[in-house]
Amino acid sequence: MNATTYIKERFAKEDDVLTAVRQGIKDRDMPSISVAPETGNLLSLLVGISGAKTVLEVGALGGYSGICLARALPADGRLVSLELKQEYADFAHENLKQAGYGDVVEYRVGEALDHLAALEQEERRFDFFFIDADKANYANYLEWAIKLANKGAVITADNVLWGGRVHDETNQEESTTYLRAFNDLVAADPRLEAMMVTTGDGLIVARVKDSIS
Ligand SMILES: C[S@@+](CC[C@H](N)C(=O)[O-])C[C@H]1O[C@@H](n2cnc3c(N)ncnc32)[C@H](O)[C@@H]1O
């Protein structure tokens, strides 16, 4: 048994609520690209440990990660989730309602970049960010997250190992190069303290330094 299997068997057992969401996504022929169970578990932990009250998610799909984020929020917590497709946002909302978080979450449908600009106009600020949408815009989402961050906010981003392609220097696919560039940006950004963890498909965990908020 390798370390990943050992860890997964102990710490990443999916509960019935999340299993039903994953199945619902398959049944609707939506892409099976929700976070891995271990990433979902880690996101819940990070939201809880950070004490975040306001979370912004970029990329909702069927609400799998949304449930993981929402379940770690305090009673007065709030999740804003940005999703390109109305049908996905509707299904995600249905699943969040089913899980008991229907009133915690607010879905905004359309291009995430437009909504991020609108959130800035509305002077909304967040304690925790989860980036999990189109890879071409990861660097833009990072900039927006830093703009919309409360003091000490946490920024996370999924798929940063991209199934091993990111550290395979022979791989020059477009999505791989976007993720590589994103990882390098995060690592070098003086406004952030950051680490990449190998959980799931790789997760960036960064904290916005107090001095820039
Ligand atoms: C990897 S899936 C998100 C999975 C979800 N975070 C989860 O783990 O349950 C990426 C989602 O981002 C959405 N998306 C892609 N491009 C987008 C954009 N420009 N603006 C907003 N959402 C986008 C897709 O429709 C898709 O639902």
Image: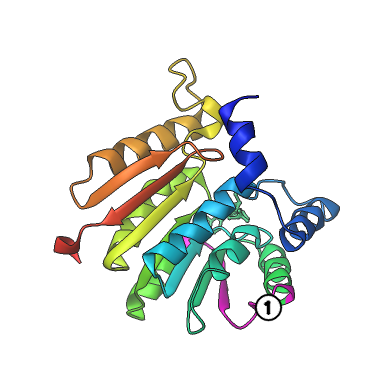
Ligand 1, by image quadrant, is bottom right
Q: Is residue 173 above or below residue 101?
A: above
The image position of residue 103, as x and y in percent, is 61, 83
Residue at x-position 51% and y-position 52%: 42
Of all residues, the one furthest to the right in this rendering is 27
The image position of residue 66, as x and y in percent, is 59, 64
Q: For the magenta stretch, what is the residue range?
A: 98-115
Residue 109 among those drawn in magenta: yes
Whether residue 135 can be seen here: yes
Q: Quadrant of residue 208?
A: bottom left
The image position of residue 137, as x and y in percent, is 44, 48
In the picture, the quarter occupied by the C terminus is bottom left
In the drawing, does residue 144 fall left or right of residue 103? left
Give whichever of 211, 183 is nearer the camera.
Answer: 211
- SS at badge 1: loop
Residue at x-position 74% and y-position 63%: 17
In the drawing, does residue 211 fall left or right of residue 37? left
In the drawing, does residue 60 fall left or right of residue 78? right
Label 1 crowd bin: few (<14), some (14–19), many (20+), radius 10 Å = few
Whether residue 115 can be seen here: no
Q: Is residue 58 above or below residue 169?
A: below
Residue at x-position 65% and y-position 50%: 34
Of all residues, the one furthest to the top in this rendering is 170
Q: Quadrant of residue 89?
A: bottom right
In the picture, the quarter occupied by the N terminus is top right
Is disc 1's CB within 8 Å of ligand 1?
Answer: no
Give whichever of 211, 31 is nearer the camera.
Answer: 211
Q: Amino acid at mark 1?
A: Gly
Q: Is residue 18 above or below residue 171?
A: below
Residue at x-position 42% and y-position 52%: 156
Location of mark 1 (residue) = 100
